[in-house]
Image (tube, rainbow, N blue to C red):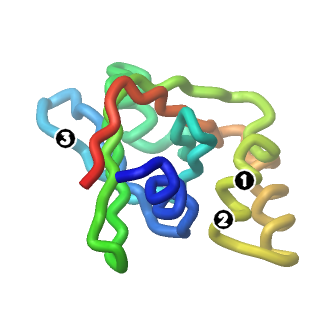
Amino acid sequence: MTSEEMQTILSKPNNAIIGVNRSEGGPQLTPVWFGWDGETFLFTTTKDRVKYLNIKRDPSISLIVDDLEAHKYITAYGRAEIIEHNVGELSRPIIQKYVSGDRLEQMVKMVNNDPSRVLVVLHPDKIVTS
């Protein structure tokens, strides 16, 4: 897949499925809204989610974006970094990808006002496309 094809797929408002390692073993899979900045994948969660606790315990995660129209997918593997400050503004590109207009500002404000909201940054070690 070319970098242009990859960018086209990752710019669409598809969900990503995040895979994290459960403490009992095996994967935990969760759909999320995501962003791609050309180097890293980004998504948000809250500190009360099991996904957050699993990432804190083991930051090795994976992500897949499936484009049903193009019949292609992108999978990334790497380590997660959790950012706890300025989450609303850092999340703006993600939110903007999925909503627009007045709803955008409402959602950014909601994220900013939620002290439990964090931004997760996936630094891929490996990206596989098909």
Q: Is residue 49 above or below residue 100?
A: above
Q: Are marks 3 and 2 in contact (CB under 8 Å)?
A: no
Corner quadrant of residue 70: bottom left
Q: Say which of 89 and 51 sits in front.
A: 89
Query: Which residue: 36% across, 20% down?
Result: 57
Q: Label 3 vs label 1: CA separation? A: 28 Å
Residue 100 image offset from top left, x and y in percent: 77, 75
Query: Which residue: 61% across, 37% down?
Result: 119
Would you say residue 44 is visible in this rendering? no
Could you tell me which quadrant the C terminus lies in? Answer: bottom left
Give SS at disc 3.
strand
Mark 3 residue type: Pro
Q: Say which of 8 and 119 sits in front.
A: 8
Give SS at disc 2.
helix
Query: Badge 1: how crowded within 10 Å, few (<14), some, or many (20+)?
Result: some
Q: Is residue 18 left or right of residue 90?
A: left
Q: Say which of 59 and 122 sits in front.
A: 122
Q: Which residue is mark 2?
A: 97
Mark 1 residue type: Pro
Residue 24 image offset from top left, x and y in percent: 14, 30
Residue 81 image offset from top left, x and y in percent: 53, 24
Q: Which residue is mark 3?
A: 27
Query: Badge 3: how crowded within 10 Å, few (<14), some, or many (20+)?
Result: some
Query: Residue 93: which disc?
Result: 1
